[in-house]
Amino acid sequence: MGKKPLVTKTQVMALALDEASTTETHDEDWELDEPTIDPNSSNLFDELCTASKQGDLEKVESLVKNFGANINKVDEWQCSALYWACLCGHYAIVKFLLENGAQCDRNTFQGERCLYGALTSEIRTLLLSYKITKAVNTNQPYFAFLSDLLYEHPFNDLSFTIRLQPQLSVDHGGDGNIPQHTFSAHRFLLAARSQFFQQQLLERWRDQETIKLSKSLVDPTAFAAVLRYLYTGQLGDIDQVVLKNMIFVCRHLDMPDLSTRCQDELDANYSDDNSNGETDPAQLSTKRMDASRAYDIKEMAKIRIDLERFLQRVLNVAAYIDVEQQQQESSTSSPTCVLKERFLSPSHELDTPNSSYSLDLDPIAIFADVAVRLDDDNTLFPAHKSFLCRSTYFRNMLEGTFSESNASPSRIAYKDDGTELTLPVVGLTNVASDVFQYVLEFLYTDRCTIPIDLAYEVLLAADLLILPRLKALAAITLTVPDEPCMDIYDLMQTAIDLNVERIEQWCTQYFASHLDTFAKDPKFHNLIRQSAHSIVGRQETDSIPLIDELRYYLGKIYCIEDSDLNAVGKVDEEYKDDWTDLEKEYNMKLDTLDDILDSLGLEA
């Protein structure tokens, strides 16, 4: 008698009907125009599902960690990315999705469906081990970066102070020194996230380094929570008194969205407190956790959108250096960068629909604290040290012992509108401006959709600037097409030199698929010889990595099972009369590889 299934189809369908009757689904506006890795893909979630089906772990990781793909969304067949990974038997992807907040709770439709559809017992055991679903935003690199900005405040250029109540000064000896709360912040981030702060920083608070706030209008605890929301999109665990104070503060700071969220939290708390025990506490906890998770996903998406719009303004103020006029100005005591036409055309799509044209092009409005000069095409990009230091290269330059960390400010003059900035300038070589804009997009938003024609240059720039995750994104872009976007040998050599395994495997698979084309090519022979020499102390009959990989992909192409192979890796001659056409062709390809090895005097 067979084992009783963990769940039955009837149970799964009952749960589906129950969830369908109690759950509303809404297409959020912020999800509609999400960027994707593949420029040809129209939907971020569909791209995640496709990668989950294919078992492409690196792409799944990038979609979740860099692009903020919604793990728990479902497609038109009510299937989540976790379900597709379970169904297709990709254990590593199932594990990654679970670790990053995928829902698999028992007694829910999605949870039971994943269990029912799991291809292997190992996946089923893994699902059962995750009894409680939890979000893990703290594991997200972008969230960690924003949290570090908030709590460690590197390169902060602004402080807010709120004096405590006068009666509290008695505890400080009555010397008249009233204690105060001090909050460090970054002008550019406040301006990017709040129109109120942007306007105040450009007008009332312009050039001020310390802003004094009234205790009667701004509660310190509530203001700290507001800053946490602006930086990370999260409220944290705060009580009802603070929520009420935040609503009051939000009215004065003109932040209606945050005020609405605080009111929703208050209403939810009131509803839970007055349930009179009619609702199971465990269900209440799950409901609140799901609501909090949904808020966090939405708020992180809003942060990315706000910073993408702000980045557009950063790119709008980048400009080409007037080298001739700068040489004429070099005799003055203060170093000067004279900028002529902008890097982007003024007709380029501007950021927020409500912002004025002049603000989008105003260099002062981005509150830059550094400028990067690209020596290859004499372009200057005003930017922000906090974001640049996400790159180890720039962090060592700006925080280390290099001269750039103590660079004197330069006077930067725009010829088109007469604006002047005073910023330290750091130089960068071997990176073109049309490539650097994608580097900035990644640094500011943790994601970017790289055009295929620039993906190779972005890969090189990412390696230079020590940005491994941007390097991975470029590698994914390069391996999306069926045909190489450049010379296959140059691409393979770059993959070897930069240790990009994904591209190396893609090139190897391409060589295997077109073996007859490359079999007599001296460049292909050189690759095999190079692979043989890469093994330190290689003996005459030791394997060659490239040959091993070619044999592996040939087996995949011709659908050969390992059990059908003999000791030398070919389909066994004993069954020659029963060989299929695929098996015959597979052995012929291996003979071709053997002929190449013989011509090179190698054995493998």
Image (cartoon, helix red, strand yellow):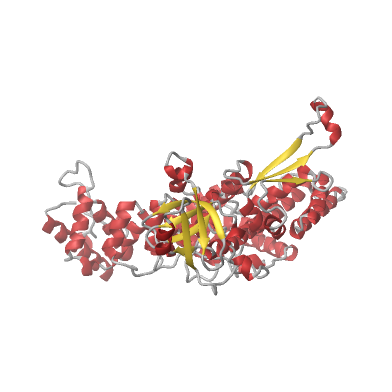
Residue found at the far bottom of this picture: 347
Q: Residue 387 location, x and y as percent?
A: 53, 51
Q: Residue 51 location, x and y as percent?
A: 48, 62
The correct choice, above or below, for 231 with respect to 401 in the image is: below
| Left or right: 34, with 537 as reference point | right
- Quarter of the image holding residue 513? bottom left
| Left or right: 40, with 238 as reference point | left
The one of 444 and 360 positioned closer to us in this rendering: 360
Q: Residue 84 location, x and y as percent?
A: 53, 61
The one of 274 and 395 positioned closer to us in this rendering: 395
The correct choice, above or below, for 288 with respect to 308 in the image is: above
Q: What residue appears at the point 18 percent right and 59 percent down from the top-left corner?
A: 525
The one of 550 and 301 positioned closer to us in this rendering: 301
Residue found at the far top of this picture: 173
Q: Is residue 497 visible?
A: yes
- Quarter of the image holding residue 214? top right
| Left or right: 534, with 233 as reference point | left
The one of 575 and 30 positioned closer to us in this rendering: 30
Q: Residue 368 location, x and y as percent?
A: 56, 54
- Quarter of the image holding residue 566? bottom left
Total marks shown come to: 0
Q: Is residue 8 visible?
A: no
